[in-house]
Amino acid sequence: MSLTARELIHKLAEDTGLTYPTVAKRVNRMMKKGSGLIESVQEIAVEYKLRPDYYKINPVKIVAETEKILREDYTQTLMISAVLGQMVEARGKERFPSPAFFAFTEMLSRISDAPRDVKSETSIEIEEHTTRIIELMTTLVSVLCEWSEQGVIGVADDCPDTLRDIARAIFRKTKLLQGGLWTCISCGNIIEARDTRALMCYECDVKLSGSRSIEDRYESLGGSDRKGYGRSTE
Ligand SMILES: [Zn+2]
């Protein structure tokens, strides 16, 4: 079974005989009109007399693979957090969509009990895992949440019960951001988006301002007080 949007579109392209870009463009257009990812892919499958139920993505498996990668190597998880943190602040093509970033922070809070290891992956492995996490997270938000032209507008009807909390958190934080508010990635407090400092509130930033290295800086995301990470005060 496919785990990411790319894999699913690739499978549909192979089965229909269309090229990957053709299928990807059609799916994009349908999704912009408010269709879900799976819904769009299945609609095209039906058009080509293929069985729609062959084209599915299981979000529970996405979460499982993400957790596996994030539990693998503590340093790697910090590096991935740093890259995604920079990407969510970036502009243009490099930008990591904020709902996908919120999904990532939810994943981090699930692994707060992970042991800190000394083993380190090579930089190539870290790069590959970062790319994989980006794909998994963008796919996860597209299947867990309901989308429209305005972006995330709720929790998808077919979101599994076990993942509803994640979907709700993504939706809530996305809505706050649309209203100009940001959830501090360290303590979870809600602040004005324009006042954020490296995705954190002023207090958390000051606490960490002496830290120079990426690891130190992102320690608070996956570090000793990891319990606070990615969770807002409810
Ligand atoms: Zn904070």
Image (cartoon, rainbow, N blue to C red):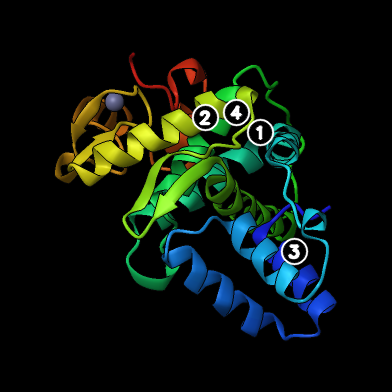
Q: Residue at x 74, y 85 (%)?
A: 18
* Residue beneath disc 1: 74
Query: Are the residues tagged 4 and 2 within 8 Å (C-beta)?
Result: yes
Q: Where is residue 207 drawn, in percent x and y?
A: 29, 25
> Which label lies toward us, 2 or 1?
2
Instruction: Report the amino acid beneath label 4.
Output: Leu
Residue 220 seen by the camera: yes
* Residue 78 placement: quadrant: top right
Q: Which mark is residue 7?
A: 3
Vertical side of 25 occupied by 76: above or below: above
Q: Where is residue 46 drawn, in percent x and y?
A: 73, 68
Mark 2 surroundings within 10 Å by alpha-carbon count, few (fewer than 14), some (14 through 19), many (20 or more) = many
Q: Residue at x 84, y 52 (%)?
A: 1
Query: Are the residues tagged 3 and 1 within 8 Å (C-beta)?
Result: no
Q: Earlier in the sequence, mark 3 or mark 2?
A: 3
Helix, strand or loop status at disc 1: helix
From the viewer's perspective, tell me whether residue 35 is left or right of residue 198: right
Give the camera-side residue of 10 and 186. Answer: 10
Location of the C terminus by quadrant is top left
Mark 3 surroundings within 10 Å by alpha-carbon count, few (fewer than 14), some (14 through 19), many (20 or more) = some
